[in-house]
Image (cartoon, grey):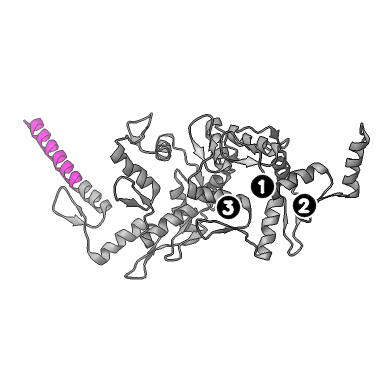
Amino acid sequence: MVFSDDFNIIRHQRTHSGKKPYHCGLCDKVFSQSSGLIKHMGTHTEEKPYKCSQCDTSYNQNSALTYHLRTHAGEKPYKCTHCNKAFSQPKYLIMHKRTHTGEKPYLCNICDKSFSDKNRFISHQRTHSGEKTYQCSQCDKVFSDNSNIIRHQRTHSGEKPYHCFVCEKVFSQSSGLIKHMKTHTGEKPYKCSQCDEAYIQKSSLIYHLRTHTGEKPYQCSQCEKAFSQNSDLIKHQRTHSGEKPYQCGICDKAFSQSSDLIKHKRMHTGKKEKTYKCSLCDKVFSDNSNIIRHQRTHSGEKPYHCGECDKVFSQSSGLIKHMRTHTGEKPYKCSQCDEAYIQKSSLIYHLRTHTGEKPYQCSQCEKKLSYRIVILKSIREHTLVRNHINVVYVIKLSHIVVIL
């Protein structure tokens, strides 16, 4: 390398020698450049002269403010040459490139783990030391680094400093804004290798893949039910605890799920529920996922493939039930005998053999039956008998006419 003046070459030579002549008078840190020491001193004085004009965040370096402003604007000038991903800061691009190269330069000297990200390495080291230095002043939670406690404190304050410049949505974390921006651009970088589905978030793809594999890693500790998503397990556990954390601010009603609260609030506001109408028939649905499932009845699309045999299904639930025929899993057990079933509906029908319940009544006679399918069979029998009588009558009448 060639330099235009002595000052620059002296600075550069320190990268080879490792010499760090600038010492902090308040701690043991040393720096190769005076600018590094000046920036560091701001961590002791807590002076943060560079303030964001869009939120209350401030920084001790102008470069840090520049990077922060990109989280508001959604600007990502640093692009990966291996894939289409882009980043707001060069350090994030460097970390991302390691996912392509497999490089993990941060090695733990206590165990064999290595990391591509310095912050994760530091957090990991605290698992050995047990160090958790940042405590929330409003609750008992303790955090291992400052950035985590700042994010956590927003759950108390309700602060949402990250604004979408396309619509009016706001977010408490920059990651939330980044994910949201993809809903405007239509970008879905996480594609399923087994079907045509693609997702905005990696976590959504992971959950989707479980519909193909039938994997359910989240198991309820109080019953034998298992779920593909942790959020579904949390909802299910409320059926045991009776917890209803979503309370209406207008009346005293409370709900176990946020979706139920949203529907309930429409009763107060008079706001009509958003509807999705099928373009091929007159059916109307309350959410997008339901209409997508319905449209498969028209298209015949069956995107869920069994990995054990050639069967395909239009819905993930169909694949999950089918997978039990391969695994032999029968999660629905009778409380009164040893019978167990693949499907909940089969258990409900079986329980009627114990209770004697017959909820279905034939419209053609007074018979009461346990199963809907038996009712349909009974109605068909009545119809066939009627049709047979009519046919015989017509034939006989015709015969009489012919004779006459």
Do the residues under discs 2 and 1 have CB atoms within 8 angstroms? Answer: no
Q: Residue at x 68, y 65 (%)?
A: 129
Specify whether residue 381 is painted magenta.
Answer: no
Q: If you read the primary sequence from the N terminus, does the residue marked by circle 2 or circle 1 appear first?
A: 1
Q: Can you say which quadrant of the picture contains the C terminus?
A: top left
Residue at the disc numbered 2: 105
Q: Residue at x 48, y 50 (%)?
A: 156
In-image side of 88 versus 227 (left or right) = right
In-image side of 324 versus 387 (left or right) = right
Q: Nearer the viewer, residue 218 or 138?
A: 138
Residue stretch in magenta: 382-404
What whole-number distance in Å separates the C-alpha atoms at marks 3 and 1?
A: 17 Å
**Position of residue 86 measured from the top left corner of the image (x, y, whole percent):** 66, 35
Q: Vertically, is 29 above or below 286?
A: below
Do the residues under discs 3 and 1 have CB atoms within 8 angstroms? Answer: no
Question: Which disc number belongs to residue 149?
Answer: 3
Q: If you read the primary sequence from the N terminus, does the residue marked by circle 3 or circle 1 appear first?
A: 1
In-image side of 307 versus 15 (left or right) = left
Secondary structure beneath label 2: loop
Which of the 4 quarters of the picture holds residue 400?
top left
Residue at the disc numbered 1: 46
Between marks 3 and 1 in the image, the one whose residue lies nearer the viewer: 1
**Position of residue 402 measured from the top left corner of the image (x, y, whole percent):** 10, 31
